[in-house]
Amino acid sequence: MSADAPRPLADRLRPVSLSEIAGQDHLVGPDGIVTRMLQSGTLGSLIFWGPPGTGKTTLARLLAKETNLHFEQISAIFSGVADLKTVFASARQRRELGKGTLLFVDEIHRFNRAQLDSFLPVMEDGTITLVGATTENPSFELNAALLSRAHVLTFHALEAQALEKLLERAEAETGKPLPVDEEARASLIRMADGDGRAVLTLAEDVWRASRDGETFNAAALQEVVQRRAPIYDKAQDGHYNLISALHKSVRGSDADAALYYLCRMFDAGEDPLYVARRVVRMAVEDIGLADPQALSITIAARDAYQFLGSPEGELAIAQAVVYLAVAPKSNGAYVAFKQAMRTAKEHGSLVPPKHILNAPTKLMKEEGYGAGYAYDHDTPDGFSGQDYFPEALGRQTFYDPPDRGFEREIRKRLEWFAKRRAENSGRK
């Protein structure tokens, strides 16, 4: 870039020290975890999880500077296996010369499992210190092997106070006040929706559009930047109230009310992928096995949105919401899971019965491992009726499906299994 080429305001105001990072005191404040890591003199691999414009890239750059590591940045959207091999080879050469590498991977959740696995050896041998950035929940989008080798740090959307400080820095940098009245300034901050880069871009648009002596009110501001302020603050009560209303409308089989709250969320600027994730949750919590198709429908809606984007992909989510609302309802599997989890935590040390344990060695066979196990596929009905719970625990019942939807059929199967188990027990 030429020295005279204009730089975007967000780039000119990029923090040059940890103290200048806005709104992430839980990470870089005096007692923040990143501050403590740097004070200890060690920095492991990290995953930065949070919404756009919250300082993930900036913090990665500053960490490289603070730890005297070479900063290398790639995007998972534009990089493949060949690019990774090149980056790793360069990092190995630097390491041989005594220089470490901090590899920042933007949108790391876009890599597939094989690509993510390729990071493991270079993380383990110290060739790179990985810092991955993602807007998606790492627990769902990244594999367990990578997560076990990295510390996940959560970035928060910037609050109004932090965004106001960015505007004040922008005014100091440009040497002129933002030409908006008080109401319009508050509206501009809401439009940024917790995104520091967005608030600076909006401010730059306002400066470009203003004439000498002109001051925009809230209505004029909206015309200038062509963006609506969110109807609710996604970090506050309005966000949770609407998603709760959507969830309960689906649970209550009211498709019309569910569509109303869904559209209110979309109109307010809610992230459709957040809504899609919550709709998937509704499928497993409130429909469950009463309609086994429900989960597939919601996953397909999420994928359709990712493929189509807004606004076309929002229709797929709306279709899934209607499907869930009119589907038969059951929380049988949800309740069973919670009960089984409580039991597992209370009795997690019990050993399974020996007859269902493998016996790969002669000693284990002599100890009775696998003795008496009945291979269900060899029985006339494909069901042996054996007991699989630890003897000290005894048989437990967690899943009690209601007599609705597909679970009517499941209940019949369970009753038949119970009858055969009783017969099997009576023969002993």
Image (cartoon, grey):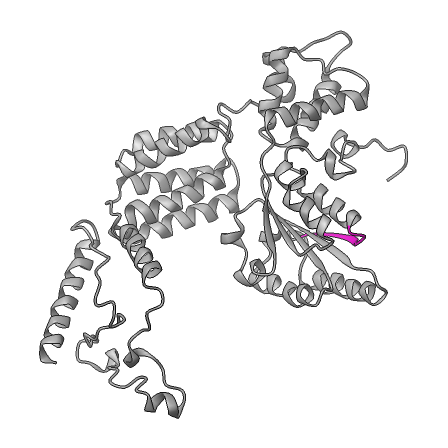
Which residue sits at x=46%, y=37%? 314
Find residue 310 and report its horizontal and vertical position in percent. 52, 37
Percent from the top left, x then y, of residue 184?
62, 14
| Residue 316 located left or right of residue 62 | left
Q: Quadrant of residue 263?
A: top left
Position above or below: 304 against 231: below
Residue at position x 83%, y 31% from top?
A: 6
User: Furthest residue to the right?
Assistant: 3
Q: Main secondary structure of the magenta part?
A: strand
Give the number of callouts: 0
Is 311 placed above or below 65 here?
above
Q: Is residue 317 magenta?
A: no
The residue lying furthest to the top in this view is 213
Residue drawn 68% across the image and 38% down it? 30
Which residue is nearer to you in this view: 126 or 8?
A: 126
Against 186, is 127 above or below? below
Q: Is residue 40 left or right of residue 422?
A: right
Q: In which quadrant of the rendered image does the C terminus lie?
A: bottom left
Question: How far across and how far down the image is residue 135, in percent?
Answer: 57, 44
Is residue 421 shown left or right of residue 157?
Answer: left
Taking the magenta stretch, the answer to whether it contains residue 74 is yes
Percent across and percent down for residue 101 are 77, 58
- Position above or below: 409 against 57: below
Q: Is 142 or 320 nearer to us in this picture?
A: 142
Range shown magenta: 67-75
Residue 226, quarter of picture: top right
